[in-house]
Each structure stands twice: as C-alpha cells, then as structure tokens.
Image (cartoon, helix red, strand yellow):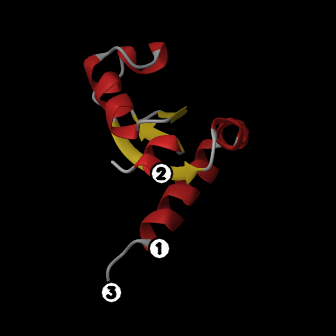
C-alpha cells in the first residue's frame, strides 16, 4: 500500500447473508472487511455473516467519506442496488 493510499478513506456497501445492505467507511478497506467476516466489524453485521463487498468508493479524507456515507444511508435499498449495478456495469471488461 502506498503512502497516498493509506491516507485515503473508503465508503463501502456490503451485502449480508440475509441480503440486507450495510454501508460504512474505513481508512483500510481490506482490514475492515476481514473484521466484518470475523464478527468484530459492526454490531449490525455481526450476526449477518458472511458479508460480500458490493460497492466501494475512495474519498480524499474522513470528512468527505462521512458525508458520502450519510448520503448513501439515506438512499432506498433500490437506489443502492442501482448504484451497485451501475458501478458493476462501469467496471465490465469489454
């Protein structure tokens, strides 16, 4: 991990085993996902494992990431699924 990457923050959405969506932020995405899988991440995901990363978005700092997290949390499930699908479509290899 480069010094630049370690300073960035991530907004992410995981899908839980019960098909619910959880949105969070972190400055170390891989470590945070491992914590969710172990049941030490968030209280919400603790009993809904395993989780699957569905969406990630890099942000410049914690403040921007927190604001974006708040925006995503206000979205309906359907809007989040559309965001996930659009992101997936944008990353398809032609």
Vertical comparison of 56 with 25: above or below:
below
Q: CA distance from mark 1 to mark 3?
A: 10 Å
**Closer to the N terminus: mark 2 or mark 1?**
2
Would you say the residues marked 2 and 1 are in contact, meaning their CB atoms lie under 8 Å apart?
Answer: no
Res. 91 image quadrant: bottom left
Q: Quick one: SS at disc 3?
A: loop
- According to the picture, the residue beneath numbered tag 3 turns out to be 94
In the image, what residue occupies the spot 51% across and 42% down?
Answer: 7
In the image, what residue occupies the spot 28% across and 25% down?
Answer: 37
In the image, what residue occupies the spot 49% across and 64% down?
Answer: 87
Q: Residues within 10 Å of mark 1 (few under 14, many from 20)?
A: few
Image quadrant containing the C terminus: bottom left
Outermost residue on the front side: it is 3
- According to the picture, the residue beneath numbered tag 1 turns out to be 90
- According to the picture, the residue beneath numbered tag 2 turns out to be 4
- Camera-side residue of 92 and 62: 62
Q: CA distance from mark 2 to mark 3?
A: 30 Å
- Camera-side residue of 30 and 24: 30
Vertical comparison of 66 with 68: above or below:
above
Q: CA distance from mark 2 to mark 1?
A: 24 Å
Q: Quick one: SS at disc 1?
A: helix
């Amino acid at each position: 991990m480069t010094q630049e990457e370690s300073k960035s923050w991530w907004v992410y959405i995981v899908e839980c085993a019960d098909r619910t969506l959880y949105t969070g932020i972190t400055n170390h995405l891989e470590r945070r996902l491992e914590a969710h899988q172990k049941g030490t991440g968030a209280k919400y995901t603790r009993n809904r494992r395993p989780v699957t990363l569905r969406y990630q978005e890099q942000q410049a700092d914690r403040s921007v990431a927190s604001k974006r997290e708040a925006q995503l949390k206000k979205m309906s499930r359907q809007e989040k699924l559309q965001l996930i699908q659009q992101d997936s479509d944008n990353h398809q290899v032609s």
